[in-house]
Amino acid sequence: MAHRTRSTILTSLWLCLWPGLDALAQGAFTDFTVRAVVPEQCMVRAEDLDFGAYDPNTVSRSSSQLRVSCTIGVPFEITLSWGSSGQIGQRAMTRGSDSLPYQLYTDAALSQVWGDSPGAGTVRGVGSGGDQIFRIHGKIEQGHFVPDGTYTDSVVVTVYY
């Protein structure tokens, strides 16, 4: 009983020390919405593909990588242009008026040419929210006897989503 009396006295004392407490017993309430929009988006970065010194007596192979980052769950498809040759299925590096044919592939076995249109020899994926790495495999066939110099091409990577 002494404990209960002591508790009652302490509560009464506390209420006396805070005379405005009764005014705080009432209130007005509302709520609000917190929102963020996460858009479907993709970003792509590509490394250069360098064949090094070409020997016309052997097949030259090289590879590089693409990094694609898309919003989680977003399906995407990667295409590669035909380069400056502008000819379907024929890529070529140039130096002045000279050209050195090459090809880009989706697989290490070099069996699937990487296409420039959705649905045609492309690579597909689904966004993970982080970087996904894809390899570009390149090949120059043997037997192209061209003047010495540096041959280059510019290939455009497009990610459709």
Image (spheres, rainbow, N blue to C red):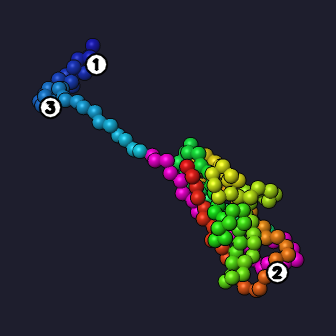
Q: What secondary structure is found at the residue carrying circle 3?
A: loop
Foreground disc of the pair 1, 3: 3
Residue 134 % position (x, y): 67, 57
Lateral position of residue 160 relative to residue 19, left or right: right
How would you rate the neighbour count of disc 3 (Cα within 10 Å): few for under 14, some for 14-19, many for 20 or more?
few
> For residue 50: magenta?
yes
For label 1, the residue is 3
Q: Looking at the image, is mark 1 or mark 3 earlier in the sequence?
A: 1
Residue at 57 percent of width and 52 percent of height = 160
Q: CA distance from mark 2 to mark 1?
A: 104 Å
Q: In the rendering, which numbered label is found on residue 145?
A: 2
- The kind of residue tagged 2 is Phe
Quadrant for the N terminus, please: top left
Q: CA distance from mark 3 to mark 2?
A: 97 Å
Q: Looking at the image, is mark 3 or mark 2 earlier in the sequence?
A: 3
- The kind of residue tagged 1 is His
Q: Nearer the viewer, residue 137 or 37?
A: 137
- The kind of residue tagged 3 is Trp
